[in-house]
Image: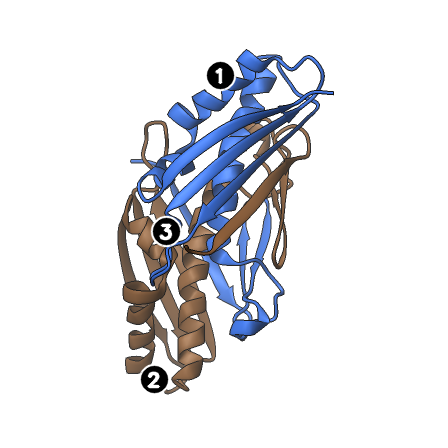
Chain colours: A blue, B brown
Amino acid sequence: MGVVNKISCDWKGKMAFETEMAGGIVKLDADERVGGENNGVRPKQLMLVALAGCTSMDVASLFKKMKAEPEDFRVSVESEMTEEHPKYYHTAHIEYHFWGNDLKKSKLEKAVNLSLDRYCGVTEMFRKFAKVTFEIIYHED
Amino acid sequence: MGVVNKISCDWKGKMAFETEMAGGIVKLDADERVGGENNGVRPKQLMLVALAGCTSMDVASLFKKMKAEPEDFRVSVESEMTEEHPKYYHTAHIEYHFWGNDLKKSKLEKAVNLSLDRYCGVTEMFRKFAKVTFEIIYHED
């Protein structure tokens, strides 16, 4: 049997909810246009944070092991929603940005591929409903 | 063309990342056992917050329109991960908890079903990789 995770969203009135979980509290809210007060993030967009966060932690863990740490690192995700209800993300483009001098590019590329092909469970989930693409972008001084 | 959402995870050293997005900042981190410092939430678990949050906001919006507001409301999600890499959630059980006296149960049940069947995009995504089940639990004084 696999690990079981459980979370709860507790209502805080109107469209506001809170989740207390390992590592912190996440506040959720809708924007004013749909009856919220913008005192928290949008739940659907957390799917994208889960995707970027999961693969970025894989890569950070791997480039440390490979002694290939960049000076800076960012992962961004851009996704398009379907037009009809229920609206879901049918594309996800992941960009891996690495900054530094003398970047160890072959190791960084290997780290990205290991995450996407073997370790990142969120990427695996996204592939079941979205077309997932990626690119690696190096920023050298 | 559907709405496009874009987010970034910015590296804060070791396994820590931050995402600035509409409604707030989400801090991500791993636990100490895997090289993190527990100063943020786990990215994969944000998938569950996205699910609980998306359907709970649908229901909160609907029970307001239906004049069927409970005294309190909580949505919890329990998911099991696969045992092999890449580890993903292959089950998701959603519990809708409503508290109050004289709960308008048929309206609340309708709100839950409308979310699950028509509006909740995150549920739609989960159905592509997980067995999704749900139950409604009333807590009357």
Evaluate whether label 1 is on the same chain as label 2: no
Q: Amino acid at mark 1?
A: Lys
Quadrant where the image shows the C terminus of chain B: bottom left
Lower sequence index among marks 3 and 2: 3
Could you tell me residue A85's position as x and y percent? 34, 63
Check if mark 3's residue and mark 2's residue have beta carbons within 8 Å: no
Corner quadrant of residue B14: top right
Q: Chain of mark 1?
A: A
Read off the residue under disc 3. B78
Whether residue B46 is visible here, answered yes or no, is: no
**Residue A77 visible to the viewer:** yes
x and y percentages locating residue A73 in the rendered image: 64, 29
Q: Quadrant of residue A28?
A: bottom right
Work out how far the residue at label 1 is from the one at label 2, CA to CA, in angstroms: 56 Å
Secondary structure of the residue carrying numbered label 1 = helix
Q: Who's the residue at 32% across and 27% down the image? A: B84
Which of the two residues, A6 or A41, is positioned nearer the viewer here? Answer: A41
- Residue at numbered disc 2: B104
Numbered mark located on residue A110 in the image: 1
